Image (cartoon, helix red, strand yellow):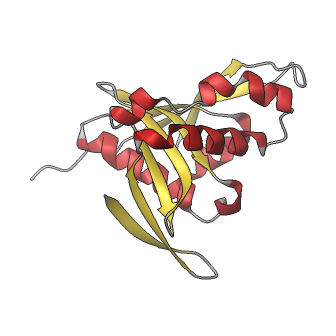
Amino acid sequence: MNGTTMTTSENAIDVQIRLALVGEAEQLTALSIASKARWGYTPEQVAAWRGELAVQADDIFSGRVHVAVVEEEVVAVMVLLPAKMTWKLSHLFVAEAWMHQGIGKKLFQFAVELAQQQDARAISINADPNAERFYLSCGAIRSYSIAAPIPENEHRIRPQMLFMIPAQKTL
């Protein structure tokens, strides 16, 4: 288990990052759905996205899913799909009560470290428009955008973000 302590403006938060457990798939899916719904999407739209928001047991079993835990409570989930050069961050969701406390950034930094250890050069993110600012603050760039219309917003686009991983220094 990888653990770290973070400090917020009010107090210290002890955040542990660990591999997800297979039995947590349903809980992690619910966390992902609730986090996505926070952006004001209609219940019908969130239900339509349920399949892509679901955390798959085979991803957990394969070691692709990590969670952030505070005081034994799972407060965030990250799914990182490995590839040779460019890994894909398919999920990074934080429970609403824990947003804006640095937990998402800590998980993102952890994803970068994991990818860097395997000599990946970049992490790609098919970001929700509402999350673009977060990924920009983590150092990602928008490489392009794709049309992603929904009934409530026919002009909606999804920013395609890219985080370039710094090369490891060798001695």
**Residue that lies at the very extreme toward the left in this rendered image:** 171
Query: Residue at the spot x=31%, y=27% of the render?
Result: 85
Q: Position of residue 78 (x, y in %)?
A: 49, 43
Q: Position of residue 81 (x, y in %)?
A: 40, 30
For this view, does 126 lie left or right of residue 117? Answer: right
Residue 138 horizontal/vertical position (percent) = 53, 51
Q: Please state which of residues 128 and 34 is positioned toward the viewer in this rendering.
A: 34
Is residue 123 visible to us here? yes
Q: Residue 36 versus residue 109: which sits nearer the camera?
A: 36
Residue at x 63%, y 45% (from the top left corner): 31
**Furthest residue to the right?**
152
Residue at the (60%, 37%) spot, across then down: 29
Q: Against 147, is 7 above or below?
A: below
Quarter-of-image position of residue 164:
top left
Asked which quadrant contains residue 52, the reply is top right
User: Visible in this render: residue 144?
Assistant: no
Quadrant, the N terminus: bottom left
Q: Is residue 165 left or right of residue 15?
A: left
The number of numbered badges drawn on the structure is 0
Please tell me whether residue 82 is drawn above or below residue 39 in the rendered image: above
Is residue 93 left or right of 20 when viewed as pictured?
A: right
The structure residue drawn at horizontal position 24% and vertical position 44%, both measured from the top left corner, is: 117
Q: 102 or 57, which lies in front?
A: 57
Q: Report x, y in % for residue 100.
A: 66, 62
Task: State the residue lying farthest toward the front.
Answer: 23
